[in-house]
Image (cartoon, rainbow, N blue to C red):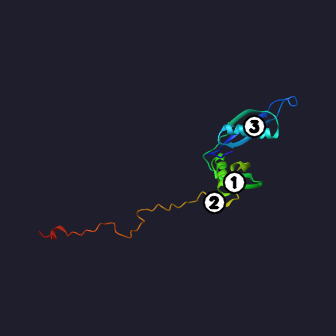
Amino acid sequence: MKALGALKEYKVVGCCLSTLKSHMPPLYQMCIFTPNHMVAKALLVFRISTEEDEVIKHLYSGQVFEKSPLCEKNFDIWLCSDSCILYHGYWDPIMAGIVTQCYQDMGARQSVHEHSIQIMKVEEIEEGKCCLLAIKQFLNFKIKFLLPHLVLWLQRKLCFPIKRLNTQRPPESRRR
């Protein structure tokens, strides 16, 4: 799967077709982060068909929206990449934005391809349980960011005068 643009969270439900062995086949439900709903359906069919050699029927797919997308939250992501388990912490208002950040971060810092990343768990955590220093520094509400390019006009002291030099004589001392 290519991580094109912002990923969205989809809930996909499917089942195998009924056979003589099982008249009531079990339902399979997945939460998948993909760019669109067609990729989410295809991933559900691919994952179930690798486990069981049966025909898969798609029942439902819908996008999952955040309950409060305007407030910042802390998220932890556990992911498996090339047979090693990694843990990352992120700070964003929506969960899909966190997963997009994670894919971009893993591709940039560790040169990991999108198809080799498997997200195991994404969990929202409280402020007190955050253990990464890069996230803890933003939890202080009294934090102030300096604006390096903002210089007030009254605080600036000029090195050179702005006033243009007058090289002419005053009008009364001129000769006619």
Q: Nearer the viewer, residue 99 or 129?
A: 99
Q: Which residue is mark 1?
A: 112
Measured from the top left, where is residue 114 in percent x and y? 69, 49
Q: Is residue 33 above or below residue 149?
A: above
Q: Which residue is mark 2?
A: 137
Q: Which residue is mark 3?
A: 45
Measured from the top left, where is residue 5 in percent x and y? 61, 46
Numbered disc 3: secondary structure: helix
Which residue appears farthest toward the right when viewing the image? 21
Numbered disc 1: secondary structure: loop
Measured from the top left, where is residue 95 in percent x and y? 66, 47
Q: Earlier in the sequence, mark 2 or mark 3?
A: 3
| 95 sits left or right of 144 in the view | right
User: How many residues crowd around disc 2 within 10 Å: few (fewer than 14), some, or many (20 or more)?
Assistant: few
> Residue at position x 77%, y 55% from top?
84
Numbered disc 2: secondary structure: loop
> Residue at position x 65%, y 59% from top?
134
Quarter of the image where one finds residue 43: top right
Q: Nearer the viewer, residue 59 or 68?
A: 59
Q: Amino acid at mark 2?
A: Gln
Q: Amino acid at mark 1?
A: Val
Q: Nearer the viewer, mark 2 or mark 3?
A: 3
Distance in Å between CA atoms under marks 2 and 1:
28 Å
Distance in Å between CA atoms under marks 2 and 3:
43 Å
Measured from the top left, where is residue 85 in percent x and y? 76, 55
Q: Quadrant of the C terminus?
A: bottom left
